[in-house]
Image (cartoon, helix red, strand yellow):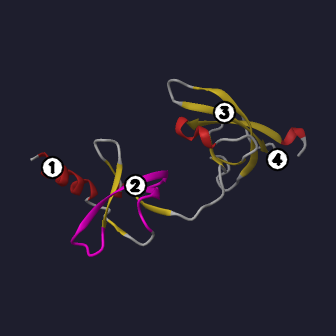
């Protein structure tokens, strides 16, 4: 890469993802002006403070721009490769219920008539899916629509 083909790009990373950041991580950038292009680069600086209003930390990347197409002020979507792909369990977001005490639960059934509430540990969220780190086994049948209703019904019964 020659120096004139490199651009600095800044990303604002949400506070909860800061621990995943490392210098040198691969970056893929897309801009609206070139929707079918991916610009590649590396994280070169992680700024030392979090914005107290947005709760985001600034990350600078050096991105290859061999045709000099990127311009100051362009909005970009960043993907920072924080880890290699992992096989795991994910459920629809409406399957996961945050209970009043802060725990996360899902409802599991084996026969679609009897339900068991499970405490789970959640991980990453993407689109309408939530990664389940523990508390659920691959292949178990999870309630999607109505999970909140089941939790509320149990809470009402316990309150009586």
Q: Indicate which label's residue lies in the foreground, 4 or 1.
A: 1
| Circle number at residue 29 | none
Secondary structure beneath dot 2 equals strand
Tag shown at residue 120: 2
Residue 30 part of the magenta-drawn span:
no
Spatial separation of the CA atoms under disc 1 and disc 3 = 55 Å
Q: Which mark is residue 158?
A: 1
Marks 2 and 4 sit apart, C-alpha to C-alpha, by: 48 Å
Where does label 4 land, which residue? 67
Say few, some or many: other residues with alpha carbon within 10 Å of mark 1 (under 14 / 14 to 19 / 20 or more).
few
State the extent of the magenta-drawn residues as a range: 109-137
What is the x, y in percent for residue 142? 34, 66
Of mark 2 and mark 1, the one earlier in the sequence is 2
Q: Position of residue 45 (x, y in %)?
A: 73, 34
Q: Label 1's element? A: helix
In the drawing, does residue 132 fall left or right of residue 37? left
Q: Nearer the viewer, residue 146 or 10?
A: 146
Asked whether residue 110 is drawn in magenta, I would say yes
């Amino acid at each position: 890469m020659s120096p004139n083909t490199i651009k600095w790009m800044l990303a604002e990373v949400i506070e909860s993802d800061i621990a995943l950041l490392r210098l040198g991580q691969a970056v893929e950038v897309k801009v609206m002006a070139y929707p079918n292009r991916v610009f590649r680069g590396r994280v070169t600086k992680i700024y030392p403070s979090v914005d107290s209003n947005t709760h985001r930390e600034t990350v600078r990347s050096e991105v290859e721009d061999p045709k000099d197409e990127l311009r100051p002020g362009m909005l970009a979507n960043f993907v920072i490769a924080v880890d290699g792909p992992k096989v795991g369990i994910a459920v629809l977001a409406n399957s996961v219920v945050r209970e009043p005490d802060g725990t996360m639960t899902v409802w599991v059934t084996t026969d679609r008539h009897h339900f068991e509430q499970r405490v789970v540990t959640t991980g990453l969220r993407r689109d309408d899916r939530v990664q389940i780190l523990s508390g659920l086994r691959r292949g178990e049948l999870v309630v999607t629509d109505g999970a909140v209703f089941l939790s509320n019904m149990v809470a009402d019964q316990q309150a009586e």
